[in-house]
Image (cartoon, rainbow, N blue to C red):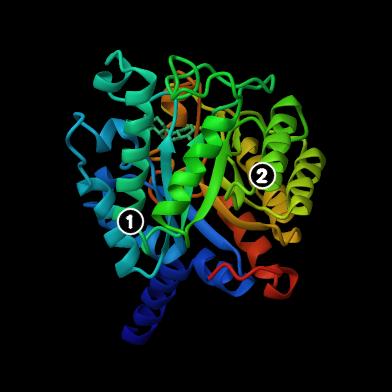
Amino acid sequence: MKSIRCFVVAIFVCADICCGGQTLRQAAQRSGLLMGTALNVGYLSEPAYTSTLGREFNMVEPEDAIKWLVLRPNQNTFDFSDGDKVVGFAHVHGMKVRGHNLLWQIHNPDWLTNGHFTADQLAQLMQEHITKVVTHYRGRVFAWDVVNEAIDEHGQLRHSIWYDRPGIGMADAGTAYIAQAFRWAHTADPNALLFYNDGSAEAMNPHSDAIYAMVKTFIKQGVPIDGVGLQMHILDLNPDVKSIAKNIARFGKLGVQVQITEMDVAIPVDEHNNPSHLEDLARQGEVYREIAEVCAKNPACTGLQTWGFTDKYSWIGWYTNHTKGDALLFDRRYRPKPSYEALRSVLERSTTAQRTRTVE
Ligand code: XIL
């Protein structure tokens, strides 16, 4: 009787630890693809959060910890404490760190936004920020989202404090201020991979056309850009997968990497935050599978990252006014969902031989 009980306990422990077979992380490691997630330092005290994180992912990205708003409470303070927690966790668990982000037109501190700085002062602030932050994490952050969401869905540069309000003195020169940010980041850490990151540019559309044109120009001009981050916040269950594959392929042909940087697949939820239609969970899994297959099939796509991993903590509720949610791989009790199994099976089938790049 005792041995039967032990056997049963062992099965549950195993099911809990390794979810039936390889973990996502093990499957990712074998496939040569980086499998990442956003990490929110607020939850690092929760054992289920940290154990799932360390077991399932080989890459993390701070969700907010190294954005200007958190890192620069005032002009003279660089508060690296939260960012250092992310990097420390990653180091202990043998994970890579993506840095996010060095420049964004929103989520900036008031002292910056309302500071009435001149173009010269802003140029100095931008150079100082990029240099200090990239230098602080040199050798510990392998890739940076240097500039985030600088282009809108029509393919136009967004007005921003860095571009033209008043900008750093390059408002007449289109994407030149972005190029400048990449150059400063490269000087601070010549070994870091430098990405331009954006949302709603996953498929072929005017937004991704503009990013493509910018990257092509940068390559011609010798601007140190290594990749494009496609956020992949999917708010309906019908992404145009063929078009996404085509878009990733064209960046690959330019010679830059693509990483899926912030994937989540939102589904409608009721007032208790439960799926409005249970069948959506299966369809959600299919969407994860389709996108992961696109990435796994193209050697230019070197990483897939989700924006959080448990439905307990996700920005989607806030973003959709609580009409959508449950967008991730684990439910609120950290039990794997169909979306998890879908990703795992794609990674298990994907082999290193398909990839030309070494990402480790
Ligand atoms: C979001 C975070 O998840 C929130 O915690 C924060 O309040 C706002 O930013 N695109 C990005 C991410 O590049 O940085 C955003 O993250 C989500 C959209």
Quadrant of the rendered image containing residue 86: bottom left
Pick the residue in front: 305 or 154.
154
Which residue is under mark 1? Answer: 137
Left or right, residue 339 beside residue 40? right
At mark 2, the secondary structure is helix
Q: How many marks?
A: 2
* 65 horizontally vs 284: left or right: left
Q: Residue 159: image x %, image y %? A: 52, 16
For disc 2, the neighbor class at 10 Å (few under 14, some 14 to 19, many from 20) is few
Which one is nearer the viewer's eye here, 265 or 77? 77
Q: Position of residue 219 (x, y in %)?
A: 68, 47
Q: Is residue 299 above or below residue 200?
A: below
Q: Which residue shows up at 39% across the image and 53% down it?
A: 188
Q: CA distance from mark 2 to mark 1?
A: 27 Å
Where does the image place residue 316, in percent across and percent down from the top left? 47, 30
| Extreme residue toward the bottom, this view | 3
Q: Is residue 156 above or below residue 29?
A: above
**Among the two numbered marks 2 and 1 on one chain, the one whose residue lies closer to the N terminus:** 1
At label 1, the amino acid type is: Tyr
Among the 4 quarters of the image, the one containing residue 246: top right
In depth, the one of 314 and 77 nearer the eye is 77
Please name the residue that numbered disc 2 is placed on: 221
Residue visible at 58% across and 70% down in the picture: 27
